[in-house]
Image (cartoon, rainbow, N blue to C red):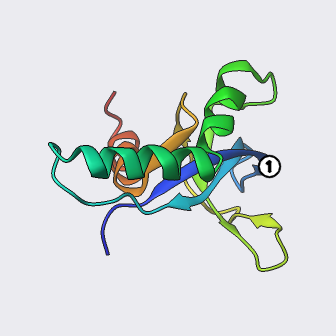
């Protein structure tokens, strides 16, 4: 258990409500050391780079194909990226997010808060 980091992909899905969204997939589980732990920060930076999160952040900043809506999906064993058409998208403008951040933003949107 714990927090997981997801990266936004270029793969898009049309949801059951007609909204187009990019699919975010699992990238890595951050090292859970103390915030004052420089070793943990080094490990997390390395995981961030090796998992391709840097590319996801650049994609969101520069691509015209980014929808601004994100759902959590998963990567199949054969490499395909899939997501559920019944997912609830969140408005997002970064290339990486945590499961906690996704849940928080989704609940906030469902309540109609900004």
Q: Is residue 67 left or right of residue 35?
A: right
Q: Is residue 38 left or right of residue 6?
A: left
Position of the N terminus by quadrant: bottom left
Label 1 sits on a secondary structure element that is strand
4, 68: nearer the viewer: 4
Position of the C terminus by quadrant: top left
Residue 85 x, y percent position in the rendering: 71, 61
Q: Is residue 92 above or below residue 81?
A: above
Residue 5 x, y percent position in the rendering: 46, 54
Residue 87 x, y percent position in the rendering: 59, 59
From the image, tell me which residue sits under label 1: 11
Q: Is residue 101 left or right of residue 57?
A: left
Look at 60% across and 43% down and name the residue there: 53
Look at 40% across and 40% down and name the residue there: 109
Give the farthest residue toward the bottom: 77
Residue 108 x, y percent position in the rendering: 33, 42
């Amino acid at each position: 258990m714990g927090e997981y980091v997801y990266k936004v992909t270029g793969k898009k899905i049309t949801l059951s409500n007609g909204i187009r969204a990019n699919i975010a997939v699992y990238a890595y589980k951050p090292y859970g050391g103390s915030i004052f732990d420089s070793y943990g920060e080094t490990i997390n930076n390395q995981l961030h780079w090796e998992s391709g999160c840097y590319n996801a952040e650049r994609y969101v900043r520069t691509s015209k194909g980014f929808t601004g809506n994100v759902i959590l999906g998963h990567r199949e064993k054969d490499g395909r990226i899939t997501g559920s058409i019944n997912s609830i998208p969140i408005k997002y403008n970064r290339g990486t997010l945590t499961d906690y951040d996704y849940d928080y933003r989704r609940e906030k949107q469902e309540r109609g808060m900004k």
